[in-house]
Structures are given as C-alpha cells and as structure tokens.
Image: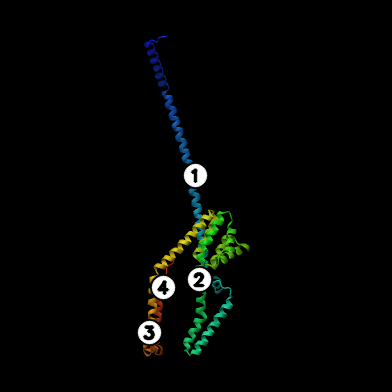
Amino acid sequence: MFGFDPIVLAIVVLAAVSAAAVAYALMYSRIEADKKSASRIDRVKSAESDRVKVKAARDRVQEMSKRRKSVQDNLKDLEKRQHEKTKKTLTMKSRLVQAGLTITVGKFYIISAIFACVLLLMAFLIGVSLMVIIGIAVVAGLGLPRWIVGFLIKRRQNKFLNELPNALDVITRSIKSGLPLNDAIRLIATEGTEPVKSEFRRVIEAQQVGLSIPDACARMTAHMPLQEVSFFAIVIAIQSQAGGNLSEAIGNLSKVIRERRKMKAKVSALSMEAKASAVIIGALPFIVATLVYLTSPSYMMILFTDPRGHFIMGVSAIWMSIGIFVMRNMVNFDI
C-alpha cells in the first residue's frame, strides 16, 4: 500500500487551481470577445429575419391594397352600368318577360282593348253617365291590365327570391365537389324550380351565343331586377377578375340573402299593425259614406247632383290620395 502525503496532495491541488485561475485570467478577454461576437451575430441574424418578415408583410399589405382597389373599381363599374340600365324606362315587352308571360305586346294591347270594350258595354247597358264611362274605359284599358302585369311581376320575383338561396347552395356544393361554374349553373337550369330554372337557362343560352359568365349573369338583372341578383352578378364578376374562393363567396351570398329575407319578414310583422291602421283609416270615409247613403240617400245624392258637391268630392279625393300615399310610405321599408 502506497501512502499519500497530505501536504503534497494539497500542494498539487493548489497548483492545479492556480494554473486554472491563471488560464482563465489569460483566456477571459478572448472568451468575452467570443461571447460578444456570438451575441452580435445573433442580433444581426434576428434583424435580418425581422427585415424579411417586415418586407413580406409589406408585400402582403400592398397586394391586398391592390386587390381591394381592383375590387372597388369593379364594383364602381358594375354599379354604374346597372344604374344606367335602371335609368332606362321599362318597355311593355320587358315587363311581360319579367312577369313570365309568353304573349306578345300586340296581343296584350288587344286583350286590354277587348276587356275595356266589354266593361264599356256593361256600363252603357246599366245607363251610367258619360264621365263614368270614360273613367271605366281608361281604367279598364290602361290601368287594370298594367296593374295585373305588375302584380304578376311582384309574385314571380318573390318566388325567385324564395328559391335563389337554395340554388346558390347547390352551386356552392357543386363547386366544392369539383364541378366548374358552367356545369353548376347548367345543373340549376335543368334541375331547378321555376322561376329560378328559366332565369339560369337564359344564362346558359347567353353563354352558348358567346357571352362570358360574368356578362351572362349581369344580363339576368334585365329580366329579374332585384338587388340579390345584382349581388350574384357582382360576386361572379369580381371572382373572374380578381380571383378568390368562389364557393365561399357564393355560400356567404346565400347566407346574406337568407338573412335579408328574415329581416324583411320581421319588419313586415312589426309594421303589420301600422298597415292595418292605415287600411282602416283609408277605408273609413268610404264606409261612412256608404252607410250614410243607405240610411239617407237624399242627403248623399247632393254630392253627385250639385256642382259644389263635385268640387267637394274632387278636393276630398286629392287629399285622400295624399294621405294614402303618405301612410303607404310610412309603413313600407326598403331593406
């Protein structure tokens, strides 16, 4: 067994520690310089990375601003063209097309004339005055047929609005499944319900004669002048020029149309009381006049036989018309 002298061991340990301290003292400046160099290199790398990120973010912002400007320009152009179209007066031919009627303008005027002649003959046989016969002729020949066409247009537009969100949902699912937009629209034109089916069939027919999809969809507003159709045409036009997720855009449009329809129904329900009040107030003078005539005919006949009565009824009709017009605007809301 070899023995170790404690004094020698302590001297060795102290010598090692002293050598390490001297080495650290000599290498300290170099170690600190290496640390500072490494830290400086890390800061330069992080600054370069931040510069790259800032440049990429700036490029994305510029690209988004360019795309936003392009979309705004397209919207302004489309709104300008649609405004120019709406400024033009609707011809009877276009109104008949909007109503879904297949008769020509000549047949419409012939039917109106026959209807006016029948009512004139009935009024003549009854023995009413000449002024009443002239009023019946104007109403029967010009007013009532046009009112019927307007009623048919409104009813067809309501049916179209009820079916348009379902058609847009079908187009969205078709595009997500891999079908192109042409085939999706053709699917609605063949499998949809009226009047959406006929309107999208016009889009397909317009494509077959050489029009692009955005132009064909824009022409739909001529046959169905609704804001929802304008939205659809704008979405198609923007997607064709600026790009984007078409299925998502059409799906969002379908949700917007459904929300607009819900809002219209809510507004109609809330304004129903005001509408009922307006109808009662508007009909009250006629009801009172009828009841007074039934109880005292001689008291009411003065209005029809005396010129002053004619003047009173004319002024009353003007004021009644103004009141009905004001009440109608008060209870009707555009959404």
Above or below 69: residue 193:
below
Query: Residue 291, which numbered label?
Result: 3
Q: Which amino acid type is shown beneath numbered disc 2?
A: Arg
Separation (CA) of disc 2 from disc 4: 19 Å
Which residue does the image show at 50% across and 52% down from the upper left? 66
State how the image is colored. Answer: rainbow
Q: Earlier in the sequence, mark 4 or mark 3?
A: 3
Report helix, strand or loop for mark 3: helix
**Residue 65 at x, y = what percent?**
48, 52
Could you classify mark 3 by the number of other residues whose Cα lies within 10 Å: few (under 14), some (14-19), or many (20 or more)? few
Q: From the viewer's perspective, is the residue at label 1 or at label 4 nearer? A: 4
Q: Which residue is the site of mark 4?
A: 328
Q: Earlier in the sequence, mark 3 or mark 1?
A: 1
For the residues labelled 1 and 4, say whether their Cβ atoms are less than 8 Å apart. no
Could you classify mark 1 by the number of other residues whose Cα lies within 10 Å: few (under 14), some (14-19), or many (20 or more)? few
For the residues labelled 2 and 1, say whether their Cβ atoms are less than 8 Å apart. no
For the residues labelled 2 and 3, say whether their Cβ atoms are less than 8 Å apart. no
Could you classify mark 2 by the number of other residues whose Cα lies within 10 Å: few (under 14), some (14-19), or many (20 or more)? few
Query: Residue 155, which numbered label?
Result: 2
Which residue does the image show at 49% across and 51% down from the upper left? 64
Separation (CA) of disc 3 from disc 1: 82 Å
34 vs 232, nearest the viewer? 232
Q: Which residue is the site of mark 1?
A: 56
Above or below 114: residue 170:
above
**Can residue 335 be seen?**
no
